[in-house]
Amino acid sequence: MKLYNKSLVFIALAASMAACSSKEEAKVETSEEVLPVVDVMQVTTQNVAQINEYTATVEADNINNISPATPNRIKKILVDVGSQVRRGQTLVILDEANSDQLKVRLDYAKLEYERAKNLLEIGSGTQQAVDQCKSNLDGLESQYKNLMENTILTSPINGVVTARNFDAGDMCGGTPILTVGQLSPYVNVMINVTEGDYSKIANGMEVEVAFDGFPGETFTGKVKRIHPTVNPATRTFTTEISINNPGQKIKPGMFARVSINLGTANHVVVPDRAVVKQTGSGNKYVYVYKDGVVSFNKVELGQRLDNAYEIISGINNNDLVVISGQSQLINGSKVELLKRDASGNAVATDSVASK
């Protein structure tokens, strides 16, 4: 009876070991047969337009701050923000008390000068007295002219009032009373160009400008001036863009996007679905296939071209890149290529069927 029980135990153990062995062999066989299936595409180099985009804020073509040379009390402000003004138009009248006092002195100086001339003519005066009176008169006339220019303030340009900082009765000081901006025929934007692009930009070069306020509409601008020194903080050159503004449609303060074509470059172009973003970082990668294995290549993206990307670096001309199935892959994964028929349609592989 004991021998019989031992035999049963031995047989059970043997069967269990055989079953485990069969399962392990099945697992090994399955892992060897099932590989990730990927679709690949051969990529080539193309001539890609190097269009750089810059952001900026619109500024008036010419800006004038309206303020007196010396502090004074404001009597009247004749315009407001948004008012269209013309050159020579009176904008602000300041307190005239000082000018009235000076006018009295000026009138008296004119009488003294005439009296000195008359005395000289009848032989009762001297040329020295005439010269002194004339010198005093000239000085007072100059003071009066300057004071009047700082009592009645006019616009030096045709433009629009873009800022008003005081009201009637206020004592004006260092801050301008008004700001007048010239919005026609041009407005300006200032962009910062990198050292690498500096040599590719020239005065008179045409650019395209878009505004959020005018979706779908493009405006034409030209490079007006390139500042000759680099900003040491940003390592960029300030560049002024002049934009046609008929009808003063574009207003100061608007957000602008300036696009400049800096020529072409011959770079690899890949479908956008080949580009993988690494989670938790801004790095971009592309899987490259070679001899049944994929490598995880970090790439530098250039221009977005509809449903493709320009690649500055990271992959080479004629490389085979993975365009589907990336979620199953890691660097160095062995893969099987998706098979296609003569019409280009996908054909299920053994690996796909086994899944």
Image (cartoon, rainbow, N blue to C red):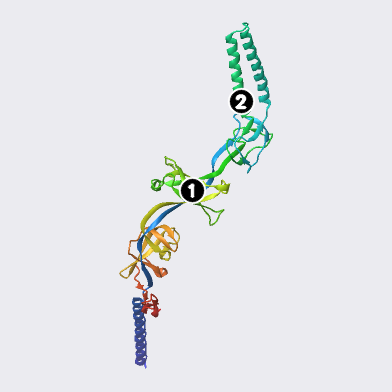
Q: Is mark 1 on a helix, strand or loop?
A: strand
Kindly indicate the quadrant of the structure image that contains residue 165. top right
Residue 215, given in percent of the width and then of the height, sits at 55, 56
Residue beneath the point at 59% across and 20% down: 139
Three-letter code for the amino acid on which mark 2 is drawn: Lys
Residue 97, given in percent of the width and then of the height, sits at 68, 26
Crowd around label 1: few <14 · some 14–19 · many ≥20 (10 Å):
many
Image quarter of the N terminus = bottom left
Q: In this view, does 247 lie to the left or right of 266?
A: right
Q: Residue 145 carries which label?
A: 2
Image quarter of the C terminus = bottom left
Residue closest to the far left = 291
Decide: is 140 above or below 339: above
Q: How many marks on residues? A: 2
Decide: is 329 above or below 300: below
Q: Residue 221 carries which label?
A: 1
Crowd around label 2: few <14 · some 14–19 · many ≥20 (10 Å):
few
Residue closest to the far top = 123
Residue beneath the point at 62% across and 12% down: 117
Q: Distance between the residues labelled 1 and 2?
A: 42 Å
Q: Is residue 342 left or right of residue 207?
A: left
Kindly indicate the quadrant of the structure image that contains residue 252. top right
Q: Is mark 2 on a helix, strand or loop?
A: helix
Of 92 and 282, the residue lying toward us: 92
Residue 282, given in percent of the width and then of the height, sits at 44, 58
